Image: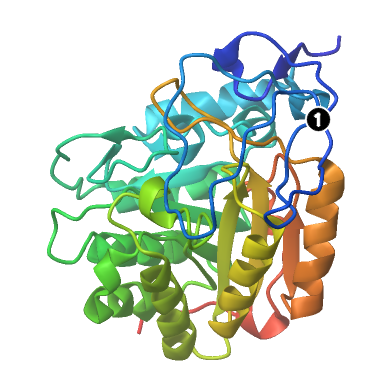
Amino acid sequence: MRGRMLPVNCVIGRPGVAKLRATSHPRGDRMQSAAEPSLSSPPRSSTAAPAPVSVRRRLPEWLKVQLPTSSAFTRTRLLLNDLRLHTVCESAQCPNHWECWSKGTATFMIAGDRCTRACGFCAVSTAKPLALDAGEPERVAEATRRMGLKHVVITAVARDDLPDGGAAHFQETISSVRDRNPGIVIEVLTPDFLDRESSLDLVLDARPEIFNHNLETVRRLTPSVRHRATYDRSLSVLARAKARGGPDLVTKSGMMLGLGETIPEVIEAMEDLRASRVDILTLGQYLQPTLQHLPVVDFIAPAVFARLKSEAEALGFVHVASGPLVRSSYHADEFAPPDRLKTPHTAG
């Protein structure tokens, strides 16, 4: 029996049927819908992002997903509940968690499910965090073992309340996962740690194979999209990680499109990421998680994502995932690090 078809941000409740396309824009190839009323792009000098609205735009056909019928989805949910683990899949309302859980994969979110930041795009709760759970690293390691993962992604909420931003907790989790799963590829998706070198060193001392920190959006929109984060700080974190981790460390970053950015701005951001020696790039469609979050300005057509993928590859990224449903850790295991990275590490 085939699964039901639902729009990817299922809280909307109605699948979109609009046929959308990208059109040129006098302020630099703005990526906009032809089926929806035109939203004028702000001047390049403006940092304003659109305010939340009470009515959402309807979804295009390419953003529908088929709900799974596999029992693997239920097994993954039960396992995560049993081990009392959080996933970014649920906390951030990822549109792909049905597919990923059906394949027995998940992105573990450590350090609690309360974030100290209030980014305008993110569905993770903003609240005073609880104390770190000392047993969490071992439970993540056990979940990884039971799921038989060969590639695991570990992320965390921003913990600006902690002196190290939660970096030592990352280190402990990486070490625990590697101890129980020799030979596994470990990818971390970290906050910026306020660009503290000591915090970054704690994470890198555990020697993850892939270090990911998301730029999220273009320079102009960063002040209104990302709470407390800055565009240049994120580039600094990525450049420091590459310099500190050396040639064996793969660095990665991602951006979401549809917040009103222009194609030239996206290309500029990709150039900045390459200047910071980032190896892997992900580009995906932003979807408004609730009516209190930033609205979608544009639904980006698959052809535009394909064009940007070609542009990124020409800039020298070794791997590019670009498409409406792409997220930072979606199909992360499709990139295989070079053979020299697959030998088991021990924490340094």
Q: How many marks?
A: 1
Placement of the C terminus among the 4 image quadrants: bottom left
Q: Position of residue 85 (x, y in %)?
A: 37, 36
Q: Nearer the viewer, residue 7 or 157?
A: 7
Q: Residue at x 43, y 59 (%)?
A: 177
Q: Residue at x 74, y 41 (%)?
A: 300
Residue 5 vertical position relative to residue 209 in the rendered view, above or below: above
Q: Nearer the viewer, residue 153 or 20?
A: 20
- Which quarter of the picture shows residue 98? top right
* Disc 1: which residue: 34
Q: Position of residue 99 (x, y in %)?
A: 69, 32
Looking at the image, residue 107 sits to the left or right of residue 263; the answer is left
Determine the secondary structure under disc 1: loop
- Which quarter of the picture shows residue 163? bottom left
Q: Position of residue 294 (x, y in %)?
A: 46, 33
Q: Is residue 328 visible?
A: no
Residue 102 vertical position relative to residue 248 in the rendered view, above or below: above
Looking at the image, residue 6 sits to the left or right of residue 200; the answer is right
Q: Position of residue 114 (x, y in %)?
A: 26, 37
Q: Is residue 302 visible?
A: yes
Mark 1, other Cα within 10 Å: few <14 / some 14–19 / many ≥20: some
Q: Nearer the viewer, residue 29 or 175?
A: 29
**Three-letter code, disc 1:** Ala
Q: Residue at x 73, y 23 (%)?
A: 36
Placement of the N terminus among the 4 image quadrants: top right
Residue 120 vertical position relative to residue 9 in the rendered view, above or below: below
Residue 302 vertical position relative to residue 70 in the rendered view, above or below: below
